[in-house]
Image: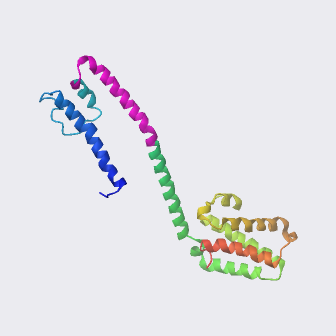
Amino acid sequence: MENTLIGAFPEAFRFLGDLIFRWVPATLIAALNASPSSPFANLEQPVTAWDVPMLLAQASGPSGYESLLKGWFVFSFITLTVSIPFLALVLYCWTRIFQIRRREYRIVRAAQRTVAAQDIPRTQLRWRRVLEQASSSNPESWRLAILEADIMLNELLDVQGYKGETMADKMKQVDRAQFNSIDAAWDAHKVRNRIAHEGTATDLTPREVHRIIALYERVFKEFRYIE
């Protein structure tokens, strides 16, 4: 057993158990000079809760037995009531551990089945095409680059296990601790929505386009979507 405070707990509980359920009953039986035929005459095992009424019957006179038995039942009720919060705490801890393990399993599975791992050639070709369009001097190519990058982001969210009718629904489910670049994803997706709604009326500059593409790139590289 480790020489630490936590390591001392099992021995302390074992000592208290022996004291309450073996030594005290044994001392009581010895003081009463229990007959050899008594089941408690040679106490070698801890007294169970079911044995207490019999022990009380031998340890008290007829007049005091009922009051002692009533006190025992009251004591049992109190201890059971006090145990309920601790049982609830144990169940809560067990549930939280199960949730954490499930989340870890989901993360591991997502890492094992990234989009790039499923379709590396196609993914890399798509991203190169996005970069070529973003570097073009044609505003229409800029819009197409952002729209395509957003489609890739939607596919990435699907692979990571996020469900929803829209990308916004999926991104609202994101745990920031597991998705460091979620703010970049939101920023880029808002520009995409503006392009989708306004079309050619959207005012874009080469600097703004490169900024948006860099946001998508940050997300994709976090999840090894692209090299």
> Is 148 placed above or below 135 here?
above
Q: Quadrant of the C terminus?
A: bottom right
173 left or right, relative to 77: right
Residue at image position (28%, 46%) is 14
Q: Which residues are magenta?
A: 58-87
> Is 10 placed above or below 223 here?
above
Residue at image position (66%, 81%) is 125
Asked whether 115 falls inside the magenta stretch, the response is no
Q: In this orientation, does residue 69 appear?
A: yes
Q: Main secondary structure of the magenta part?
A: helix
Quadrant of residue 206 within the rendered picture: bottom right
89 left or right, relative to 22: right
Spot occupied by residue 104 in the image (x, y as percentages of width and height)? 51, 62
> Is 115 placed above or below 15 here?
below
Q: How is the image coloured?
A: rainbow
Spot occupied by residue 150 in the image (x, y as percentages of width and height)? 72, 69
